[in-house]
Structure formats: C-alpha cells, structure tokens
Image (cartoon, rainbow, N blue to C red):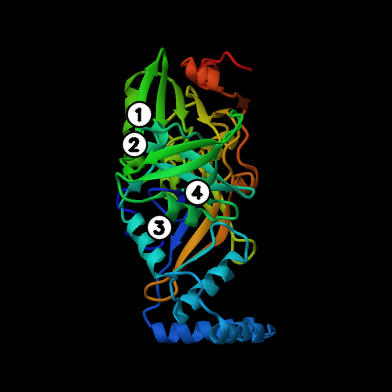
Amino acid sequence: MEEKNKQANYKVVLITSVFVLAAFGIGIYFGKQNSDKNNSNDLFVANASSSVSSVDMTPFWTVWKTLNDKFVYTQKNAKVITDQDKLYSAIEGLAASYGDPYTVFMPPEDSKTFTNDISGNFEGVGMELGIKGSSLVVVAPLKGTPAYNAGIKSGDIVLSIDGTSTEGMSVDKAVQLIRGKAGTAVDLKISRDSAASSLDIKITRAVINEPTIDTEIKGDVFVIKLYNFYATAPDQFRQALRDFVQSGKSKLVLDLRGNPGGYLEGAVDMASWFLPLGKVIVKEDFAGKQDEQIYRSKGYDAFNSNLRMAILVNEGSASASEIFSGALQEQGVAKLVGVKTFGKGCVQELLPITNDTSLKVTVAKWLTPSGKSITEEGLTPDYVVKISDTDLKAGKDPQMDKAIQVVDGLSN
C-alpha cells in the first residue's frame, strides 16, 4: 500500500497480509490520541473502574503475588520477564478473551512493527491470511510473489509455521512468525482439499512489489484484472475504464479473484463509476452502539444500459472486493461468476493505549445494500463455476469462459 495511512481515521478493509499489516483484516480506523493525555487517562480509568466494579479482582492480584513469591525459572537462558511484561501479557489475554481473531492488544515491539508495516515496508512471502472457523487460512497469494511461486493457493490451511502449530493461533501471531528479512526462509505445513496428505512448503522471503491492475482484450470483451484496492487502485482503475471506453467495446469482465481488499474509500470511488448518485454501496453496522453509517455512490455513473458486465470472484476475494462486488450485484449492474467469496467484512479501530502500545478492536461489520452481512455469509455468485487443478494444469479457465458467455448474453 503506497502511503499506508498517513492520515488518521482513513479506513482500510484488508485481510491480514503477511507482508503488510499485522492485522487483517480488515477495515481499520486510525484513532487519534487525545492531546490532553492526563485528563484522557483519568477519564478512561474512571470509566473502566465503574464498568468492572462488580468484578472481584482478588484472584488476579493473588496470582500475581503468588507468581512473584514462588515461581522459579528452570529452563536454561529463560527470559526473565518484568512486571511490565506481565501487565502486557494480561492485557493481551483480555483482548483475546473476546474470541475475535482481529481484536488484538499490541505491546511496544508489535505496535512498532505494525506502524512500520502500514508505512510501506514490505518484506515477506506475499500472501493474505484470515481465519475460517478455527483454522488459519490463506485468503490469496499475490501474483509473482514468493508464496505464489511456491504454489500456495487460496483456501490452503496453514497447519504449522517453522514447526510451530497454528492451532488457536491469531492471524497477527502467524504474521509475526511468517514474515522476516528478504533472503531468509520459512517452512509451512499446508493442508489442501485436493491433496491426500499435508504438504511441506519452504518459501524464501523477498521484498514484495504489489501488482495493482492488468488489462487485456479477449475477442470483443475487455478484461480488467484488479489485484487490490490499495492507494493507487482508483487512479489506475479510472485509466483502465478510459481504455475500455476507447476500445469501443461494451462488454466488461472485472477479475477480482484473489483480491484481498484495500481502502474502503477506493471501493466506494470505483463502484461510483457504475452507479447513479446516492445509490447505496455499503452499510456500516455498529450493533446499536452508534448509528448505522451508509456509504453512497458519488454518481460518476459513466456507463449506459448498453454495458454488459460480469465480475469474477472466488474464495480469495475479500473485504473491499466483496463491498464492490456486492454493491454492483445487488444494484443490478453486474453478474458474479465463480465461487463463494471469503466473507470478510468487519471493521477495526486502531487506538493508541500508551505512547508505544495500541489496541486493534473490532467495532463494526459491513453490510451489502440489502443488509446482508458480508462477514457471516460472503457473496454467492449468480453463476457458480469451480476451477479444478486439472483445469489449471491444462491452462483452462472455465470461470473466465463463463464470464465471457455471460456478457455475450449466452447464459441464462
């Protein structure tokens, strides 16, 4: 992501990237810290105290004292933890108790790494991670990256990282273990539906250069392949649409397979090219804790009824991809072709807790214009078409073939 969120409160809807964010997911609000820090902290402590007034904290302090009095280090070269370490670990456990893989407390080192990541430092393997049930799942490897070249696929379940089991592991922890300096390697044990047994895959990390967009013409169909919704995507998408118009064609296939998302603002801007002013693109549901927020088309609405459009999606299409696709599907602009999307539509707020720690907390979920929860349901294509390993080996793409049939008017 170029210029990763230099502005506070800029929302991102991303899955956790092994080379970008130590989060996923995600939509993120970057909260502002109160300039009157002391007053803010006093108010926070007062509110926190009142909210837990009925909780007996005696067990916590009893365990704290007992550990201080009795614990003996038995492992050679064990790290001696400080009281500050204990406090941070307790807060991490508090955040983890909510059972949400995207709600995470970040101690100083993790918080610094996160800040560096969103500032644009990319070293890793180039794949997006998410949680499905209790499994750590690959959302999508990015084209041309080490993960892609090593054969990692959307839907792969990561069983272990350098021998460490991922059972019960958060996406943030997995990201910490997988990423690293370019030139170093990481060993992943993968479970894949099409494989009879688990796969051991070694990936050498590299500096990641993220592709954004490609275009091509297939017969009388213009195809745009969009890899993400990051900062440069709206401008590049606008140029691709200009090329589409100049081609004189009226049939468009937008390929969002393996697109893990990006900036919410980008998805809204890009959907606005196809929708009249004021049409709903996505809703933000805060579960009654604040009023629902609705994002509407800016009304660029550059295409007339002659446009025939299909959008390709798969299990690697997530977040901003789902927002964009869901809006155009429900507003009657485009048909979806492929398989059910990942289902990632929750929003996180990134809050500074101290000068060097932060909390990433889920605060809302995204809904399609009709009110369908993206996180709970994902998007089901109008035309469900699977692509097999045999198809891939043979260089066939039945999903693309079907999308072309749809815009050609050959599918019912």
Q: Which amino acid does label 3 sit on?
A: Tyr
Numbered tag placed on residue 10 in the rendering: 3
Q: Does 8 sit above or below residue 370?
A: below
Q: Closer to the camera: disc 2 or disc 4?
A: 4
Q: Quadrant of residue 364?
A: bottom right
Q: In which quarter of the image is residue 106?
A: bottom left
Residues at marks 2 and 4, CA–CA distance in whole angstroms: 31 Å
Q: Does 108 sit above or below residue 379?
A: below
Residues at marks 4 and 3, CA–CA distance in whole angstroms: 37 Å
Numbered tag placed on residue 211 in the rendering: 2
Residues at circles 2 and 1 in contact by the CB criterion of under 8 Å: yes
Q: Does 210 sit above or below residue 174?
A: above
Q: What residue type is labelled 2?
A: Pro
Please give the count of numbered marks on the rendered protein: 4
For the residue carrying disc 4, how many other residues have a C-alpha within 10 Å: few (<14), some (14-19), or many (20+)?
A: few
- Give the residue drawn at x 38%, y 66%: 109
For the residue carrying disc 2, how many other residues have a C-alpha within 10 Å: few (<14), some (14-19), or many (20+)?
A: some
Q: Residue 309's spot in the image, x, y percent?
A: 50, 25
